[in-house]
Image (cartoon, helix red, strand yellow):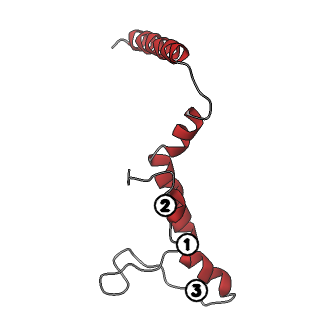
Amino acid sequence: MRGLTLTGIFCYNFQAMDEKVEQTEQPERPRYSRRDGEEGGRAPMSVEVMLRRFFRDVQQSEIMTEIKKRRFFEKKASRNKRRAVAQVRAVRRKTKRGY
């Protein structure tokens, strides 16, 4: 996890996306590795790579699951019941597999 927060999700730099939209026809650029580019800097990333990294970071930080879980209030009794059922299910699964 990279320490993403809910407010920090949308703070990614989409400057490359804007540049790609403004320039209609451009010659095909060579693919850069992460170490190519200016001194100490990174090579420009394509839009696809930026989106893939963004969605991977969101999925790894488990923000969407947290949002879905907190969408509706869950009483303490129902939460405890759900957890107890999950524990019983886990025990059955372990005994079935022979652990």
Identify the mark at residue 14; answer none if there is no mark: 1
- Which residue is at a point 60% across and 90% down the rendered structure image? 27
The residue mark sitting in front, 2 or 3, is 2
Q: CA distance from mark 1 to mark 2?
A: 12 Å
Classed neighbour count for the residue bearing mark 1: other residues with Cα under 10 Å, few (<14), some (14–19), many (≥20): some
- Residue 62, image x, y percentages: 48, 43
Identify the mark at residue 43; answer none if there is no mark: none
Name the residue beneath numbered marker 3.
Answer: 28
Q: Residues at badges 1 and 2 in contact (C-beta under 8 Å)?
A: no
For the residue marked with disc 3, what is the amino acid? Answer: Glu
Point out the residue furthest to the right here: 24
Secondary structure under the numbered disc 3 in the rendered image:
loop
The residue lying toward the viewer, choosing from 66 and 97, is: 66
The residue lying toward the viewer, choosing from 60 and 11, is: 11
Considering only order in the chain, which callout, 3 or 2, is on the residue closer to the N terminus? 3
Considering only order in the chain, which callout, 2 or 1, is on the residue closer to the N terminus? 1
Which quadrant, please, contains the C terminus? top left
Quarter location, residue 18: bottom right
Left-right relation of 39 to 31 = left
For the residue marked with disc 2, what is the amino acid? Answer: Arg
For the residue marked with disc 1, what is the amino acid? Answer: Phe
Secondary structure under the numbered disc 1 in the rendered image:
loop
Point out the residue furthest to the left here: 40
Name the residue beneath numbered marker 2.
Answer: 53
Classed neighbour count for the residue bearing mark 3: other residues with Cα under 10 Å, few (<14), some (14–19), many (≥20): few
Considering only order in the chain, which callout, 1 or 3, is on the residue closer to the N terminus? 1
Q: CA distance from mark 2 to mark 3?
A: 22 Å
Q: CA distance from mark 3 to mark 1?
A: 20 Å
- Residue 63, image x, y percentages: 50, 45
- Residue 14, image x, y percentages: 55, 72
